[in-house]
Amino acid sequence: MIKIYTIKVLLATLFVGLYSMAYCKEPQKNILFIVFDDLRPLIGAYGEPEPLTPNIDALAKEAIMFDKAYVNYPLCSPSRASMLTGIRFDNQLQVNGKMANTKDMVRLQTTWPKVLRDNGYWTATRGKIYHGEAPKTEKSSWDYSGKPGGGKYMEGSPEILSKIVDIGGRQDQIETYKKTGNGPASLMYAAVDGPDNILKDGQVAEDVIDYIKNKRDKTKPFMIACGFAKPHMPWVAPKKYFDMYPEDAGKLAYIPEGVEKSMKSEEFTGRKGSEIWNEGVSDEMAQKLIRGYMASTTYADAQMGKVIQTLKDEGLYENTIIIVWGDHGYHLTDHGKWRKNTGYNISLRCPLLIKTPDLKESGVVDNVVQNIDLYPTILELAGIEKPDSINLHGNSLVPLLYDKKVKWQNITYTCAQGNYGLVTDKYRFTITKTGNYYLFDLENDPHEWNNLAYERKYKKQVKEFENNIAGVKWNKP
């Protein structure tokens, strides 16, 4: 009798175990997705000595950091749309005769926040995730769609203007900023004698903390997207973040000896002023502006730190996937430029860190990865199968996170201002709209001053890259 009873118990236990394996999935992890605007990898964790980014650096010690992460289109709106839809967007994407905006682009495919919500996640957004407010077509992606963080003023409200204790930059753009309270693309810095929440990013952090503590549905896993506007221009930050840097902080970009500071042969132009070296500001002022960029970065980093500390305080940190991403690179005087939207490597490269609860150790990945890889990565980390209706241009980064052997094509395709190109783990190649070719050896010429495209020994390489670009898929699935 005892033996029969024992066998029955064993069979019952086995049945329950098999039932659990078949029908009981592991609980889904929470996801915190953090986006910085105009943040290039000018970060301590990326080996940069000047910027003070203690919170990103601390996360990097528990995360996988991607050293060669790129965006397909180095401009806020298309870069964010690509990240949300998993689609490469073309220079020439038009809607009603005008360049498509984020609202137009995210309509082309269901975004990953919508897929997560459809699969049981409580979702919320605050700050700059889209290029402005979540479009009407995206409202169903979110349980809580917070303010984008813009409003009437872009860090230039009467209250802020009254508290500025130091200001500098291009005088014409300072005047625009003071007159309109806006000037989001003003080449200027301003130190404000006020608390963190006098500016938008401080308010974003407070609201995201409220989501975590109070607003979320605690019966569901959450996905919270937190978008910080800094270090986007204008470089306005509380004075205490400027005070963290010495007056002589701010390193200008490398220029080879004998190079003329001229934009005469520069094919990547754009906003008014960019046809002049460093937009006409002196080296002394340029240094102060870079200090302002770094102060803005440190301010945004501090806001991220508050959010992550809340996860820890609430006992959620160990069960939360954290992704930190910047929407493109930035020049900061590289090749006499300040901004983005060029074919240069410094404009295309972005920061990317991913921390997961079951990551055994931190590390650095040298494979070339793209913003369009985030969609399939997030689905896989969340344990969600890709819907059949979704056609993605990127690949999941999960195998790279866990150091699994995987074939990886180290190449990304790029476009900017009518030009098309690619980046590999060694080269950056671009064909401009005027038909000129540029090939740079990123290992031996990381600052991209020696164009190899017309040298005979690179003829075969150029032809191969030409063919690669001719076959790339753009615009939509």
Image (cartoon, rainbow, N blue to C red):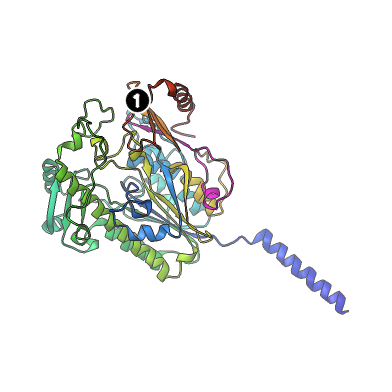
* Figure quadrant of residue 184: top left
| Quadrant housing the N terminus | bottom right
Magenta region: 393-417
Residue 378 in view: yes
Number of dots carrying numbers = 1
Amino acid type of the residue tagged 1 in the rendering: Thr
* In magenta stretch: residue 35: no
Q: Position of residue 231 (x, y in %)?
A: 27, 50
Q: Is 89 located above or below residue 171 in the figure?
A: above
Q: Residue at x 29, y 51 (%)?
A: 229
Q: Residues within 10 Å of mark 1 (few under 14, many from 20)?
A: some
The one of 100 and 74 positioned closer to us in this rendering = 74
- 52 displayed left or right of 137: left
Q: Residue at x 45, y 31 (%)?
A: 474
Q: Position of residue 11 (x, y in %)?
A: 79, 68
Tag 1, which secondary structure?
Answer: loop
- 246 displayed left or right of 100: left
The one of 348 and 61 positioned closer to us in this rendering = 61
Residue 154 in view: no
Q: Position of residue 475 (x, y in %)?
A: 43, 32
Q: Residue furthest bottom?
A: 2
The one of 383 and 326 positioned closer to us in this rendering = 326
* In magenta stretch: residue 405: yes
- 157 displayed left or right of 55: left
Q: Position of residue 82 (x, y in %)?
A: 42, 41
Residue carrying label 1 = 432
- 265 displayed left or right of 343: left
The one of 27 and 173 positioned closer to us in this rendering = 173
Q: Residue furthest front?
A: 257
Q: Is 226 located above or below residue 217 in the figure?
A: above
* Figure quadrant of residue 76: top left
Majority secondary structure of magenta residues: loop
